[in-house]
Image (cartoon, rainbow, N blue to C red):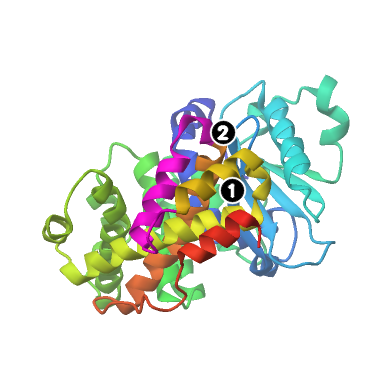
Amino acid sequence: MVNVQNAHVQQFSVKTDTIFYNLFLEFPGILFELIDSDPEEATIYEFTSREIKQPSFRLDGLFLPTTEDAEKPFYLLEVQFQPDEALYYRLFGELFLYLRQYQPPHPWQVVVIYPTRRIEREQAFQFGEILALNRVKRIYIDELGETPSGSLGIEMIKLVIEDEETAPERARRLVAQAQIQIDDEASQRNLIKLIETILVYKLPQKSREEIEAMFSLSELKQTKVYQEALEEGEIKAKLAAIPRMIEFGLRLPQIAQLQDLPLEVVQQTEQSFQKQKVAAFLELLNNQRDLFSAQDLAQLQEWIAPLPDQIKDLSGAIAQWCNQESHTLQRQAWRQVLSDLWKATVESILKTYPKTLDLTSSPVTKQMVQQGIEGN
């Protein structure tokens, strides 16, 4: 078993959210290994979050089934590296608010990951019976035994709480194991990058270059595959930043110059974002109609009716309506949907870069918005 010290847990806990988020996002099968299920189950799940309307907050760490099989549970995942007397009050409160609002067609499961039992605060008086249910699984990383199959995912989680003295050696073994077991170059690269990130947090006295030298990562980063992936990541970040730069008042030629991108790509990205703003609002009207009162819908009709059938005018009016103080819930839900759509759009643009996409396919029109408002 892995030894863990209280001081070490306190020092490292502030970094764990990002690390575990990236771990489960990149390798979702880890969750199912932790609960003694087939890691292939991850292929029918989506790791995501959901907005809860009242009180307004985001429920993170959801594994939602992408299948209609009603026997497949959804999982609410919590990673807790610091003592928190109120954890179970918050966790189960959020769970039941989610159940009330979404009424999901799948049974719930809760998975809580602790570095050690000493961190947990059970609050047995209120939650003893719930915690004893098969629906609740508590994982203590320092009690995870050796994995016969040599699971990369489980070993990665152990690395998070490994002692500083032994962490480099465990990391070396993980890098070697990843290079043997993972055929996909991108997944292999992402896992090695996660290992490097964990060590940067665990060994603050060492520079990133020193940590790279431990595993010959400097040589790895000189390979053509790594360099191409690095360039792709940089372009993706530049594309994703364009809407924010427009909001700050920069003109498209300025953005193209600052981001070192072709002007036509910047223009297309801006047009795509305007289109997705309208598409996201349409999705709200169709799928979350209970967010809108009759008065809201009547007001929207008045806003949209005089506008020309132009995406920029429609998206501007929708943004202005959502940004009113009285439309906080709609604004939050709209931004969440828009964020998801925009991520997919950036990926599409990236696939054709530096060529531009055909924006004439799947048009979004004024008539579609009006029909959405009317509920047709």
How far across and down, in percent of the image, does residue 246 sit?
A: 25, 50
Image quarter in which the N terminus is found = top right
Residue 239 is a magenta residue: no
Identify whether 45 is placed above or below 333: below
How far across and down, in percent of the image, does residue 82 sit?
A: 56, 28
Q: Residue reaching furthest front?
A: 306
Horizontal placement of 197 versus 295: left or right? left
Horizontal placement of 328 versus 346: left or right? right
Question: Residue tagged by mark 2?
Answer: 81
The answer to whether one can see residue 220 in this image is no
Q: Which residue is rendered at x = 65% and y = 45% of the image?
A: 77
The residue range painted magenta reads: 306-328
The amino acid type of the residue labelled 1 equals Ser
Residue 315 is a magenta residue: yes
Q: Which residue is rendered at x = 40% and y = 75% of the image?
A: 185
Helix, strand or loop at disc 1?
strand
Q: Is the magenta stretch mostly helix, strand or loop?
A: helix
Question: Residue tagged by mark 1?
Answer: 49
How far across and down, in percent of the image, does residue 177 sit?
A: 48, 67
Image quarter in which the C terminus is found = bottom right
Q: Which of 359 and 69 is in front in this view?
A: 359
- Alpha carbon distance from label 2 to label 1: 20 Å
Q: Nearer the viewer, residue 177 or 290?
A: 290
Within-10-Å neighbours for mark 2: few <14, some 14–19, many 20+? many
How far across and down, in percent of the image, does residue 99 sit?
A: 77, 43
Q: In which quarter of the image is residue 37?
A: bottom right
The amino acid type of the residue labelled 2 equals Phe
Q: Nearer the viewer, residue 311 or 349?
A: 311
